[in-house]
Image: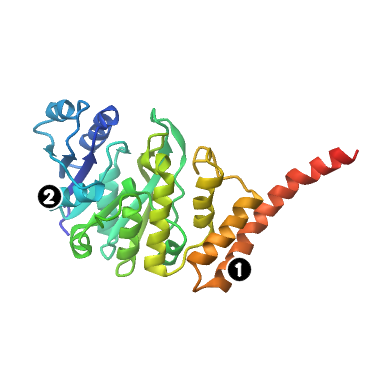
Amino acid sequence: MLREPLVSIVTPTYNMAKYLEETIQSVLSQDYPHIEYLVMDAGSTDGTLEILRKYEGRLRYVSEPDDGQADAVNKGIRQTRGEIVAFLNADDIYLPGAVRAAVEAFRENPESAVVYGQAYYTSQSGEIIRRYPTVDYDPDLFRTQCYICQPATFIRRDVWDEMQGLNVRLHYALDYDLWIRISRRYPMTAIPQFVATSRMYADNKTIRLRRLGLTEIIGLLRQHFSYVPPHWIYAYCSTYLHKKADGFFIPDPATPHCFLATAFVGSWINRGSLPRYWMDCARMIKPGLRILASKLIPAIRTDSE
């Protein structure tokens, strides 16, 4: 890898004008000198093109229909030349020094296929909500969780090409799928610096279309590992039983009927691994039972007095 390699960044967007300019500025204000930036617009009608025209000469853009986020990113990266590639959604941003930190991490860890930094969840207005729960790289952890924040990741071009980019059939778990596929062949490196933010709000597809996203994750885990841990099943069941819960702003409550649904639904999904699933369910339910007991016992005592 060159000492100062070209870093290619692609932003897929569709009718995200309210956030897009902040995203663009977060890329163009990076202190790293060798950045190639391409915005792939799916044919927005909300003023996106007017914003993009303001930055002509500092970025490139394409405005044409696509088959979703994965398709837009794949097509965009094929039009770039960088040794390092990344994609930044139109409602996320890079923090100052993000690209330079990624290049330094690759220089120090040349065997790594991916470097990923720390990140924050932010509100619709951009205020920090909390830290994204990133952990040090452990390929086995992908069996249970996606612990890498997508906008905080940078990927070696040769690895991206080898993996043939994102799976265009996926619309919610496309990054999780890519991390799993890469982790089977190459190491990744976590870096301690905060490099990006992920915006969470009611219209974010992760929240608005949560059930579809969870359905995709369950299918992905079945495909890759032939097993789905109970916490994913519980979240899925909660979308039916606790409709106000979104899993982020309003956590899934611990309720007996959702635990029961998790046991039945998960037993069918994991019918080839029932002893393992039931043991994992028991471990998950114990904290829930303690929560229920803490609520029920005071109520029982009050009624009996």
Q: Is mark 1 on a helix, strand or loop?
A: helix
Q: Name which residue lies at 47% across and 61% down.
A: 144
Left or right, 2 with reference to 90: left
Q: Which amino acid does label 2 sit on?
A: Thr
Q: Counting residues from the N terminus, which is met first, the one under dot 1 or under dot 2? A: 2
Q: Quadrant of residue 202?
A: top left
Residue 106, horizontal then vertical, whole percent: 26, 57
Placement of the N terminus among the 4 image quadrants: bottom left
Q: What residue type is labelled 1?
A: Met
Residue 295, horizontal then vertical, whole percent: 74, 43
Mark whose residue sits in front, 1 or 2: 1
Crowding near the residue tagged with mark 1, few <14, some 14–19, many ≥20 C-alpha atoms within 10 Å: few
Residue 242, horizontal then vertical, whole percent: 56, 43
Q: Is mark 2 on a helix, strand or loop?
A: loop
Residue 2, horizontal then vertical, whole percent: 15, 57
Q: Distance between the residues labelled 1 and 2?
A: 48 Å
The mark found on residue 297 in the picture is none
Q: Quadrant of residue 19?
A: top left
Q: Which residue lies furthest to the right in this view?
A: 305
Q: Mark 2 points at which residue?
A: 80
Crowding near the residue tagged with mark 2, few <14, some 14–19, many ≥20 C-alpha atoms within 10 Å: some
Q: Mark 1 points at which residue?
A: 279
The correct choice, above or below, for 222 with respect to 117 in the image is below
Looking at the picture, tell me which residue is in the foreground, 253 or 262: 262
Left or right, 126 with reference to 97: right
Left or right, 184 with reference to 77: right
Q: Name which residue lies at 63% across and 48% down.
A: 254
